[in-house]
Amino acid sequence: MSVINLKLLEAADLPHEADKVLDPYVILWTTGNRSGACRSTTKEKSNAPNWNEDFKLHVVDFSKETLMIHVLDKASGEGIGFWRFPIAPIKQNVLHNLWLSLHSFGKTFFAGKIHVNIHVAPVTVAAYNAPPQTFVPYNLNINVEHAVDVPNVHVTASDPYVSFSIDGGEVYQTRPVKNTTRPLWDKGYSIPLTTTDSVINLKLFHNSSKKDKEDEVISFMDIPLGLFEVGKVFYDYYILAPYKRKSGGFLALRIHLAPANVIPFSTNNDPVGDEPPKD
């Protein structure tokens, strides 16, 4: 049996009003074990909290669950930001040292960042006793499959498309699909990566189809590729963060990190993940 060892280190750039000081704390859980949620201490009157606290999260089904990290403010009772990520792609038996971009609770795009160590390993292995993730040149093979539960921009549906870049570089974009909350794209890309810290910056748009009106952002997500195991194909639903709305929908992606001489998505392992996660 494996567990997620998570060391909560610190947070930075948490959004707050100019004259306001936060009392932040963090709640962590996996979607298959909500009753096993963990809570950090509250760092009173701190907009740049340091925790250095250890947590151990038990996972019921690695292929279907999502890791949830929510940062909240005790003083106001409001959420500050969150990070949610499917557990299946996380490479095991290595130490991931990451600054994670927090997604806002529907108000803006991002809500600061949080510094964590993540170590997925058998329960018998000492926490954090693992080598760091190492980098070898490889390609990101990504297929934008489909989305479900896309919020309505029209009265009954949207005209959604996906736009993404790697570390803010070249922009890749699917075609828009008209009048649907369940768009199908099935569009593949193969992109060379140059660093183990690369991040997919992804947004889901509504295509306005009017020259005098900009396309509307529906939802978004940053995906840190440094968490992924190289050589395996992962098919997962990602919980998109809503932008100025209550929900953002779920996006199905097939991701395969592999050397350039390997045919995209050609491995012996079966892709994991087959349904949107539940909170």
Image (tube, grey):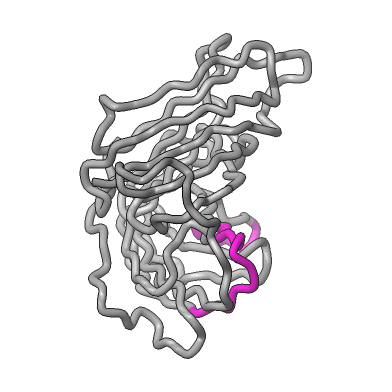
Question: In this view of the protein, can residue 263 be seen by the observer?
Answer: yes
> Could you say which is closer to the camera, residue 247 or residue 103?
103
> Residue 93 appears in which quarter of the rendering?
bottom left
Position of 70 compared to 11: left or right?
left
Q: Position of residue 248 (x, y in %)?
A: 42, 44
User: Vertical placement of 131 versus 134: above or below?
Assistant: above
Give the position of the C terminus as an image quadrant: top left
Q: Position of residue 59 (x, y in %)?
A: 27, 41
User: Vertical placement of 247 versus 231: above or below?
Assistant: above
Residue occupying the far right of the picture = 18
User: Vertical placement of 67 versus 202: above or below?
Assistant: above
The stretch drawn in magenta includes residue 82? no
Q: Residue at x 62, y 55 (%)?
A: 214
The image shows a total of numbered marks equal to 0
Residue occupying the far bottom of the picture = 261
Q: Position of residue 137 (x, y in %)?
A: 58, 78
Q: Over which residues does the magenta segment extend?
A: 190-212
> Could you say which is closer to the camera, residue 242 or residue 64?
64
Q: Residue at x 50, y 25 (%)?
A: 26
User: Vertical placement of 179 versus 76: above or below?
Assistant: below
Q: Residue at x 32, y 64 (%)?
A: 235
> Could you say which is closer to the camera, residue 123 or residue 12?
123
Q: Residue at x 36, y 46 (%)?
A: 125
The stretch drawn in magenta includes residue 196? yes
Question: In this view of the protein, can residue 183 be seen by the observer?
Answer: no
